Structures are given as structure tokens and as C-alpha cells.
Image (cartoon, rainbow, N blue to C red):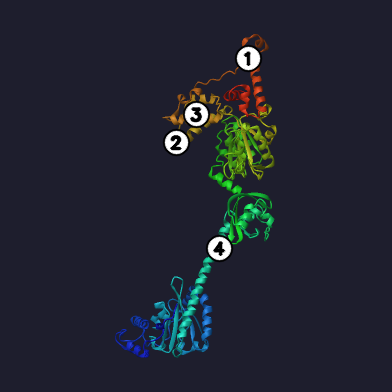
Amino acid sequence: MTVNAECYQPLVTDALGAWRRFTGAPQPAGPVNLAIRPDILDSWQRCWRAGVDPENRSIHQQLSAAGFQTLLHKNQELISIAKPFIENLYGIVAGSGFVVVLADIRGYVMEIFGDQDALVNPMTESFFPGADWSEEEGGSNAIGTVVKIRRPIQVSGAEHYCRKHHCLTCSAAPILDNQGHLLGVLDISGASTATHLHTLGMVVASAAAITAQIDIRRKNNELNVINKRLTNIFNTMSDGVVMLDEKGLTRQLNPVARKILEGENGTGAVQEYISEEQVLNPDNVFIRKMLKQKESFVDVEMMIDTRRGPDHCLASGTPVTNEQGEVTGGVVVLRPITQVKSLVNRLSGHYGTLHFSDIIGESQPILEAVRVASLAAASAANVLLQGESGTGKEIFAQAIHNRSERCSGPFIAVNCGAIPRELIGSELFGYEEGAFTGAKRGGKPGKFELACGGTLFLDEIGDMPLEQQVTLLRVLQERKMCRIGSEKEIPVDVRVICATNKQLLAEFERGTFRKDLYYRLNVISMTIPPLRERADDIVLLFQYFLEKMDKHHRRFTIRPEVEEKIVCYNWPGNIRELQNVVERIVSLSEADVVQLIQLPREIRDWQPQKELRTPDDLSPESFLTTDAGRLAWRQRLWQEEEREEILRLLSSNKGNVTLTAREMCISRNTLYRKMKQYAIYG
């Protein structure tokens, strides 16, 4: 803001004559007739149009007490910023009879500084808190005119529109914000005989200083808001944030990082520094490179030393540099690997959706199974579910998980019989980058890692190869594991639920299952009853699947002969077979009555069969005297010898089917068929 000579220097020495000509004329005189500054002439014309009486000698109107308090409250920030500058400005003019005034955007006086005699001087008697110095009230004057023109101006002597102010010289400047909006007016007023250019210059400089201070205050407020936002982000983000200095010492932790480093609750006293060895240990080479070589790192698996022991985290780090490019510290973001895995499991559907309420049945065997499973859910022990294929073992596993304390964690199911024996190790325990040909870059976590904090369901556990049974036993005992190709131990917090349709003790006798693993898994054992032992539930399940699968919401009626057939049928596939039969009926049904013809032929034609007699059923007489008996006995001996040979060769070949088939001079398919016939799994 600069001072122009036109702001204060009259164009004629006889301003009083110009004023008399203007106020005495019936119509306002124009600039041609009056040699007066344009800003002054414009102000006079505004006053004339507003009906201001130039001969009015009354004191200016004043705000009410309540109105003045409202004015001060509304302009509190401006007053607090401007007051020190007003005091400094008054210190320059003190003792000269001048008063320093701060007015609002309408011209009302908010603050006034002056000598005691100046405050009671009739010349300056209209300067008091709450006084109205607008042009409409006081005529042309520095304060009221600045309110109109938003520029600095000096009004002296007869340039004032009202005669009562001809004794004054007033110098005023606007106080603006960074967008040019008027915030207030700063003014110095005194006797007209003391008119000087420097007076307006001081006012303009002080107003500019106030404007600059307002801008600084605004920027500081913005910085405070930004700082509060960053602090809120720092304190509320779900990842741990550690601020390090150039030596790798911890300067600041957010609550999540404090929880990671100090314990589950994070209530321990925070040390001002954490020793360098705790941060820059040999495993944290990435942090060392970040601080020494300015190398950032992203999503690196890292074992962090905490008060409760090593913690597996995913870490990202960025160096912090000064203006010279020197590293002054770094920011490390820690994400517990369990949190990452939980997110992965949630997005990939690794969670249990079934509960005990989803188990349909009212028969005594199924109710007993539900009772035992409910008790098992309250425990943290391993559970072994036994039962034929299709009886619903996974439903029980999910129900146990969802009623346990781990219900908020992942539920991951692995079918040990569906994974090739060469891949089951990497599937369960994961692998490091470069562990074998074709290993995924960056490695891959196994199912044990992904299931941390939750439940791992190992279905068809009886089909797990012997070599992997040893590794599984060790993980269950030590609660630690190593990925394939790595020596770094990773703690695992997993509850294991296993399921099998085999008799594991019999498999141990055959040499296909480890007895020590069986006892480790068989802490709580329960058998899911087959459907043929739940005759009372068959019709109930049949009706349930009809209602669940029918998209047209029909109310099916089951014919009595249909109920008789499905109740008498043996259901070798159990509930899975029943569900498939119902799905077929719903898909092909044109009516809402289930008739006998809609059942599969094997169910319609099924009749209870007498059990075939074995050599054990034959009496010694028939065994020795009949051809059928002698043939059956020889066949049984031959089959037992063949089965023993297969078991022996599989054991010596460590379960390798190809080598075993080659030694027996048969194809792999033939060997698999014989293994299935003799119930050999491995």
C-alpha cells in the first residue's frame, strides 16, 4: 500500500472557499467549478445525496452498550492483532494532541488511544468508543471515506463536509485481508494545523503491518489445522508409524506402533529412545540402507524385536532429508502380518459362514454330535472329525469355529487329498523366493500363516503324505514354522480341526499314518453319523433342500411312496447325495408334487441286499467240500498277499507310486485301482 500525493494535497489553497461554494449552491458544483481533489468532491456529493447537514454541530451517534459489545466480539481477532500496532503508533504521536482510532468496516470506533486532554478536547470530542464516523453520520472524513473508497486518504480542515470538523486533520488507511476484503480502518486525527505527509505515511505503514500480521495469523491457523489433521492421522491410522533419527533411534511412535513394540495393550512406559541395537539389528538391513544410502523400501517382511519377542510385520520405510539432501531420519510404517492376512482372508472369502443352526436334524445321533461339537467350540484344543464322505464334516468345522473365541479370525479349509503330494508342503507352509524352480517372486505365505488368529481345517487328513506328516507334527508341537527355502521361524497361532473318512488307527497299522500325529490331532474326537443312521432326519432334510433350492418358492408335496423309498435307501453318498437328488428334482420338476418317477433309478430300484458270505462265514465243512468255498479262500489269501506287497513297496519307496508300479510290472492306473480296492491311501 503506497501513499500518493493526491491522497492528502489540496489542489487549491482556498479549500474553505470551495466548501462554501459547494454547500451554499442550490445544486452541487462540478469539478470544473471547484478546484478540489476528486475523492473529496465525490465524498461531498455522496454526503449531499445522503442529506447530511454540513452545519450540524451535534455529537455523533453512538452504539448501544449491547450493540458495542456485539461489535467487539465480532471483531475480536482484528482488535487483538491490531492493538499492539496501535499502541506503538500512539507512542510516536503521544503528547501531540492526536488520537489513534481503530474502526470497523462501517466506521464505528472500536479502539481509541490518546492523551487525556485530547480525549476530552472539544475538537476531538466525537472520538469515543462506539461513535459512528460513517459519511452518512459525520460527512466527509478519513474514516468514513476510506470505508467507501477502500484506499488511504488524508482529509484536512475545510475538506471535511461538516463545519464542526474543519478543525481536524484525519489520516486513515484500510486494513485488508489477503483477498482484498475490508476488515477495518486505522486512523490518526488531530488539529488541522498539524497536517503533515508523514502522518498518513505512518498510518499506511501500520495498516500494512496489521494486514501482514493477519496474513501470518491466518497461515499459522492453516498450519495448525494441517498439523492437527496430520496428528489425527498419525494417531488414528491402523498401521504403526515409527519416526527415527539419523542414528536409527526412535523419536516418536504412534499408538499402533507403541502397541506392536511394547505389548498387546501398549501400557508400558515409553522410553525416550530405543537402543540402536533394537532397531538396527542384522535383520533390519533395509532400515540401515534407508538411513545410510537413502534407499526406500516397500512391503518388506521383517521380524521386529518387541518386549514380548519377535513380531512378524510388513514394513515400508522412507528417508527424511534436509535442504542439503542429508538424511536426518526416516519414517517406518509397520503393519502386523496378521492384520494383512486377515484382510487377504476377508477379501478372498476365507471365513466361516455356517453355524450350528445350519445343521438340520432332530434325530438322537445328530443331536449328540451337535452337543459334543458345542463343547469342543468352547475349548482351544485340536478337534478330529470322523465320518463317511458327505456327512457334513466341514459344516461342523465351521460351526465350531464360529462359536469359538476365534470366530473373528479366518477360517481356511485345505483338502489334503486334492493337492498333489509334491505341492502340499508349499501349500501349507509357504515358500521363499527362489526356493525352487517356478517359485513366485517375493515368496508366498502358506495356509498356516494365513490362518493365524483363526482356524485351519485340514480335510481328508488321512491322505496327507508321510513326509509332510512329520512337518505338520512339529508345527503343532512348537507353534512355529519355517517356509520352504527359509530358516526364519514364524510363530503361528492356529487352531487345527481335522476331518477324515478313514480309520486313522487302522491306517497307522498299515503304515500310512503316523501314530504320534494321530494322538496330537485326536485331542477331541467325534464321529458324524451317516445318513442311514439318521432315518428320522431324511424326510426333514429332503423337504429343507426342496425349499432352499426352488427359486419359484413352491410348496412341494412329497408322495408317501417317495418318503418310503428315500427312508429305506442306504444313501452311500450321505447328505451330499441327498442334496444332489433334490437339486435334480427341483430342476426338472414341472409341478409341486414329488412323485416316485422323479427319483433316480438306483433309488427307485434299490432293495436291501443280503450281505455276501466271506470265507469267515463258511463252515469248515463247506469250506473244504465245496468248490465255491475253496475258491473264495484262495482268492482271499491271494488278495492279502498282494495287499501286503503293495504296502511293503510303498513303504520302501517312501510312497512313490511310480516306482512301486514299476517294480510290480503294472501301470500306475492299475496300481491306483488296486490301492483303492484294498483301501490303501498315501
Taking depth in this image into account, of 285 and 208 the one nearest to the observer is 285
Q: Name the residue under label 3.
A: 581
Taking depth in this image into account, of 44 and 547 the one nearest to the observer is 44
Is residue 649 shown to the viewer in this render? yes
Q: Name the residue under label 2.
A: 551
SS label for mark 3: helix
Tell whether 143 sits left or right of 252: left
Give the answer, above or below, for where 560 lies relative to 115: above
* Dot 1 crowding, Cα within 10 Å, few <14, some 14–19, many 20+: some
Q: Which one is closest to the eye, mark 2 or mark 4? A: 4
Residue farthest left in this picture: 26
Residue type marked 3: Val
List x then y, in percent, for residue 522. Answer: 67, 35
Q: What whole-number distance in Å separates the C-alpha atoms at marks 2 and 4?
A: 55 Å
List x then y, in percent, for residue 648. Answer: 67, 25
* Dot 3 crowding, Cα within 10 Å, few <14, some 14–19, many 20+: some
Taking depth in this image into account, of 324 and 664 the one nearest to the observer is 324
Q: Do the residues labelled 2 and 4 touch (CB within 8 Å)?
A: no
Q: What whole-number distance in Å separates the C-alpha atoms at marks 1 and 3?
A: 37 Å
